[in-house]
Image: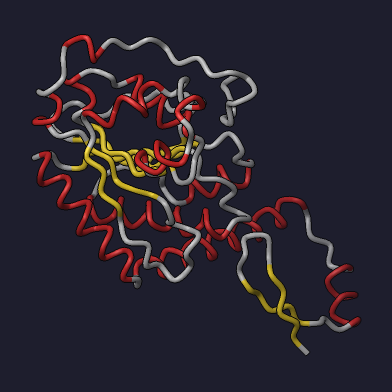
Amino acid sequence: MANSILDSDGFVTVAKKKSVKAKRLLNNCPLTTLVAESVELDTCLKSILKAKRDVESSSFYNSFITVLAGVTKELEKSLAEIVCFGLGRISLCKAAQHQLGLLLLLGEQFQCPVEVFDPVFSSLEKNVIKELKLKLSPTNCEGKKKPVLSGGCTLFVFPHCPKELSNNLLYTNWNPRHIEHCILYSNSFEKIRLDIPFRFLKSYHYLVQSQEIVEEVSVPNIFHFLDIFNDLSLHYFPSHLKCNVQSSFWESPEPNYPASETEIVESG
């Protein structure tokens, strides 16, 4: 008989009882560490590619491509690269696997390189990234990364990440030349400003100030798992909004987060 159980990601799975004989055969199998790691790698890759197909066949993906194409058209820039921070445990988390599936599809759709980093990646997960032909960032830059500046733009993807990452990205690119090359798919700036009392946003100067220069477009959350792409929006910085601010607007003090507030894993 099969039992329905709820896994750590909130997905319903079915667990079948294994026979005693099957358990003995498994326990007596003399797998070496190398072979075991190879099996884990293969299993993880299959799960991710299955999640990729799941995203590709969804109405959500079609909607995402339509919205993103509209953004790049308005900016009059092609997508030159995709950078994702904070993806999570792609060997264990179904949400992370579907988000990685979206990255793979976008890389194929726009024919551009995809770079990823998360300090929680295990050695297995780093090997998975290599097998998928993605670039693994060598260091933890805490979101402080510049975009491509040679005519194109960079799509930064921070799925359900701490707001420090978005604030750090804005700080690093807080000038008219750099910020127009950034598109950010992350937790909605507007929702952050509305949901969090202002006194708790004092350390997030750039998230607050960005409301003067940002256009935010929500992508309808119509994926069949509602907790994978929820509360995420595309943010971009059109020229006509940047022209409306004073030169003093671009002053950029370095962010300083109280230890009691910060959620990011800082670089060592």
Q: How is the image coloured?
A: secondary structure
Q: Does residue 159 appear left or right of residue 36 in this picture?
A: left
Q: Does residue 189 appear left or right of residue 98 in this picture?
A: left
Q: Residue at x 31, y 24 (%)?
A: 209
Residue 13, quarter of picture = bottom right
Instruction: Estimate the x, y position of residue 229 in percent, counting from the top left.
Output: 43, 56
Instruction: Estimate the x, y position of residue 162 in percent, counting from the top left.
Output: 51, 36
Quadrant where the C terminus sits is: top right
Above or below: residue 202 compared with residue 103: above
Above or below: residue 120 compared with residue 128: above
Quadrant where the N terminus sits is: bottom right
Q: Residue furthest bottom?
A: 1
All told, the count of numbered labels is 0
Q: Nearer the viewer, residue 229 or 21?
A: 229
Above or below: residue 23 compared with residue 47: below
Instruction: Estimate the x, y position of residue 50 in percent, counting from the top left.
Output: 48, 68
Instruction: Estimate the x, y position of residue 243 in percent, counting from the top left.
Output: 10, 23
Q: Residue at x 35, y 71 (%)?
A: 58
Q: Does residue 1 appear left or right of residue 254 in this picture?
A: right
Q: Residue at x 32, y 39 (%)?
A: 184
Q: Residue at x 23, y 18 (%)?
A: 175
Q: Nearer the viewer, residue 75 or 56?
A: 75
Q: Nearer the viewer, residue 221 or 43?
A: 221
